[in-house]
Amino acid sequence: MGAAVFFGCAGIAFGPALALVLLTVAAEPLRVIILVAGAFFWLVSLLLASLIWFVSVHLSDREDAKLQYGLLIFGAAVSVLLQEAFRFAYFKLLKKADEGLATISEDGRSPISLKQMAYVSGLSFGIISGVFSVINILADSIGPGIVGIHGDSPYYFITSAFLTMAVVLLHTFWGVIFFDACERRRYWCLGVVVASHLATSGLTFLNPWYEASLVPIYIITVCTGLWAFVTAGGSFHNVLKCLSCKQEADSRVMMYSALRVPFEE
């Protein structure tokens, strides 16, 4: 039973992310490099947030339960702000790298677009964030023990898996929106990204009241996904064309008569 829960929850949490990596990232070495580097940036932000929370806890009264809970909320908010700050730093780094790649290329264009970099960097933030948020839960799911035997919710593991999947997707969407906002200097979009990230993190404190946390988070995920889809240049027409699996005929005509080799007499 423990192995089934482990693999089931791991598939729910990381199945979409694994599919995206295999289909859109793994075949391109440059995208793989951006994916790994983005995970490193997220880890540095987590390290700084952990240090701030660790110092604040040790400087406070550990016997005060309300104060410790407040510091936990404070640590979560600081972590969100640092993640977004490092996302901005990663945008600046990729922007410089993009200019360098365009300089050394033969045609003067970068081999990867800014939207592609935004997508891959957001996916990297989401994957590493999901790994750190659910790895201990997956380890406990193997057993021994039964969730809910002492009156707790028996849906702890599966709701954690669905929450992790939402966070992975949200980071991917936030990356697309954030990079586009930085490129076009739309500061209100940056504010919405940070605010939705803070709201998502704050909703997790409502657990184990999962109806009040999971449902709003998925509403935010769907809305943010639609926004990121439009930002990336998607449209309803493109969706229909993708679902129909039809390709538009090439309107260009090649004159083969001009390429013929004249007959020898």
Image (cartoon, grey):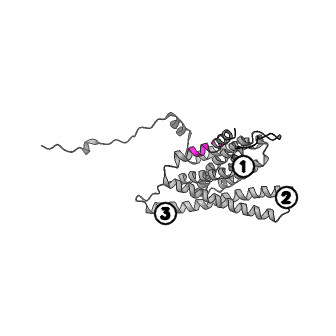
Instruction: Give the extent of the magenta segment.
Output: 11-19
258 sits left or right of 138 in the view: left
Name the residue beneath numbered marker 3: 100
Query: Residue 35's x, y, as percent?
Result: 56, 54
- Quarter where residue 251 is shown: top left
- Determine crowd level at label 1: few under 14, some 14-19, many 20+ residues with C-alpha closer than 10 A: many
Q: Main secondary structure of the magenta part?
A: helix
Q: Amino acid at mark 1?
A: Thr
| Image spot of residue 196 (x, y percent) | 70, 50
Q: Name the N-terminal-most of marks 3 and 2.
A: 2
Q: Nearer the viewer, mark 2 or mark 1?
A: 2
Q: CA distance from mark 1 to mark 3?
A: 36 Å
The amino acid sitting under disc 2 is Leu
Which residue is tagged 2? 67
Task: Please identify the quadrant where the C terminus is shown.
Answer: top left
Residue 125 within the magenta-colored segment of the rendering = no
Residue position for label 1: 200
